[in-house]
Amino acid sequence: MSDHELRVSKIRNGTVLDHLPGGSALNVLALLGIDGSGGTGVSVAMNIPSDRLGTKDLVKVEERELSQDEVDVLALIAPRATVNIVREYEVTEKNRVERPERVEGVLVCPNSNCITNADEPVHSRFAVLDDGVRCEYCDEIVREGIADHLKVE
Ligand code: CTP
Ligand code: ZN
């Protein structure tokens, strides 16, 4: 995006999550446990025109460098995301997310009889497939709307 189209100010230090699917930013923030309560800057732009994606969302988290591990889980809802680390206004690292092999404690199994939803719940664990995720306890598969199954803390 050229500078005259800039929607959110550049940041001095932090992480810029770019190329998120249009409309996904709030789910991305929930997934990363970012709710603004820390008092540092969080900027969100949604449904911005993008050459590559049609529309995209953008999230800037100031004063925090998200690790590759933290953002790998993002691949489930934002497979084409770019993670930019910014230091003193310069992008010092640019990484793509990578699909993790499994995600633990992040999703809630949609099968109400699953042991992960029992009274004394077991930590959920899903294997990541090419086209969805599979509960490793009951084999339930989620293909669409994975973000609807995010565990809300
Ligand atoms: N950015 C920022 N603050 C900075 C530097 C960069 O908010 N001090 C943002 C830019 O606005 C952009 C993202 O970080 O959204 C990546 O910056 P840059 O690599 O300079 O942009 P592009 O070349 O457009 O990125 P890409 O090639 O990944 O599309
Ligand atoms: Zn299950």
Image (cartoon, grey):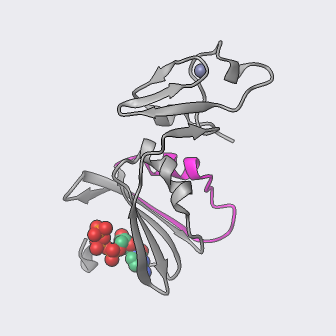
Left or right: 6 in relation to 103: left
Report the magenta residues as a range.
22-45
Q: Quadrant of residue 97?
A: bottom left
Q: Going 62% across and 52% down the picture, which residue do you hit?
A: 33
Give the vertical position of 145 relative to 41 (above or below): above
Residue at 56 percent across and 70 percent down: it is 65
Position of residue 87 measured from the top left corner of the image (x, y, whole percent) = 50, 82
Q: Residue at x 67, y 69 (%)?
A: 39
Locate the N terminus by quadrant. Answer: bottom left
Asked if 105 appears above or below 94 in the picture, the reply is: above
Q: Nearer the viewer, residue 32 or 116?
A: 116
Judge left or right: residue 39 versus residue 98: right
Question: Residue at the top extreme?
Answer: 113
Residue 84 colored in magenta in the image = no
Q: Quadrant of residue 152?
A: top right
Report x, y in % for residue 143. Answer: 40, 26
Residue furthest front in the image = 101
Where residue 118 sits in the image (x, y, percent)?
74, 19
Farthest residue to the right: give it.
Answer: 120
Residue 9 visible in the displayed image? no
Q: Quadrant of ligand 2?
A: top right
Which sits in the foreground, 142 or 53? Answer: 142
Q: Position of residue 153 (x, y in %)?
A: 69, 42
